[in-house]
Image (cartoon, helix red, strand yellow):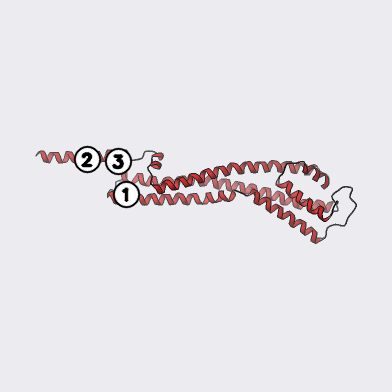
């Protein structure tokens, strides 16, 4: 009789102990899930953390860069509007800080001066204008300088695009690995209780959330800065056309 009573009591105590252990091991916060994650999941999270730090550094760097370019562009365009001739504009631009606009203008003026030495001076005698071949060469020089300035301003944007496209995939890979581990745990324990399955699935989904959190700011910043880059490039292209038009208006082409 004692044996029959003792057996259910022992079994109940064993179940209670197992439940207590399960409750102790069950994560209650996201941090608990991260700290209790498997090595592959932690590795994916570390990579995503590195991507996040790089992404935010690039975001602030390009924000300062394009803000400086915008300020320099406003100064340059103001000086160009005040100048009456290219000679006055060239003298005024030389006093401005270095900028993409200044370099494009200087490259065009220098190349034109090589083709027609002294032709930019207001008191220069009338000279024969540029031939069609020389005019096309001047246009190509300006386009080359514009392309170089665009490439210089685009530095870092490719990494934002990479981070924005790769981070969700890394998060998905971590999720797949976590779910595989959860199913392996179910197979090993033989338990399909939701309390035993849920922590593993929740842990697996953490990497997806982190991957999206890393990717979303990077994608937003990339599209924003590409728009700013296109705006600056369009202004430089318009200025190059205006530069050649001014040469024609002053009878230097």
Placement of the N terminus among the 4 image quadrants: top left
| Image marks 1 and 2: residues in contact by CB distance under 8 Å | no
Viewer can see residue 107: yes
The 10 Å Cα crowd at callout 1, few under 14, some 14 to 19, many 20 or more, is some
Residue at image point 61% right, 46% down: 225
Q: Position of residue 180 (x, y in %)?
A: 36, 52
Viewer can see residue 85: no
Residue at image point 58% right, 43% down: 59
Residue under pointer 2 = 14
Q: Which mark is residue 22?
A: 3
The residue nearer to you, when weighing 117 against 239, is: 117
| Residue 100 appears left or right of 160 | right
The 10 Å Cα crowd at callout 3, few under 14, some 14 to 19, many 20 or more, is few
Measured Cα–Cα span from mark 3 to mark 2:
12 Å
Label 3 element class: helix
Q: Is 35 drawn above or below residue 107 in the view shown?
A: above
Q: Position of residue 69 (x, y in %)?
A: 68, 43
Give whichever of discs 3 and 1 has the lower sequence position: 3
Residue at image point 52% right, 51% down: 165
Residue at image point 65% right, 43% down: 66
Q: Position of residue 6 (x, y in %)?
A: 14, 39
The 10 Å Cα crowd at callout 2, few under 14, some 14 to 19, many 20 or more, is few
The residue nearer to you, when weighing 212 against 48, is: 48
| Residue 137 appears left or right of 41 | right
Q: Farthest residue to the bottom: give it.
A: 133
Q: Which mark is residue 18?
A: none
Residue under pointer 1 = 185
Q: Position of residue 213 (x, y in %)?
A: 49, 44
| Image marks 3 and 2: residues in contact by CB distance under 8 Å | no
Label 2 element class: helix
What count of labels does the image hold?
Answer: 3
């Amino acid at each position: 009789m004692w044996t029959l009573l003792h057996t259910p009591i022992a079994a109940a105590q064993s179940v209670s102990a197992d439940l207590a252990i399960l409750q102790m091991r069950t994560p209650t916060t996201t941090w608990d899930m991260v700290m209790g994650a498997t090595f592959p999941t932690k590795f994916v999270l570390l990579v995503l953390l590195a991507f996040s730090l790089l992404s935010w550094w690039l975001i602030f760097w390009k924000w300062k860069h394009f803000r400086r370019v915008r300020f320099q562009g406003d100064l340059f365009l103001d000086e160009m509007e005040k100048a009456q001739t290219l000679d006055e504009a060239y003298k005024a631009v030389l006093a401005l800080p270095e900028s993409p606009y200044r370099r494009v203008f200087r490259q065009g003026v220098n190349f034109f001066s090589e083709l027609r030495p002294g032709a930019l001076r207001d008191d220069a005698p009338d000279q024969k204008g540029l031939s069609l071949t020389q005019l096309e060469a001047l246009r190509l020089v300006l386009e080359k300088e514009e392309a170089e300035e665009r490439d210089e301003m685009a530095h870092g944007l490719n990494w934002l695009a990479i981070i924005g496209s790769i981070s969700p995939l890394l998060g998905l890979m971590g999720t797949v690995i976590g779910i595989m581990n959860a199913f392996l745990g179910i197979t090993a324990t033989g338990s399909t209780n939701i309390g035993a399955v849920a922590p593993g699935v929740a842990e697996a989904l953490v990497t997806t959330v982190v991957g999206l959190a890393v990717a979303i700011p990077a994608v937003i910043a990339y599209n924003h800065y590409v728009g700013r880059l296109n705006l600056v490039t369009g202004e430089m292209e318009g200025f190059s056309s205006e530069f050649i038009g001014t040469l024609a208006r002053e009878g230097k082409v």
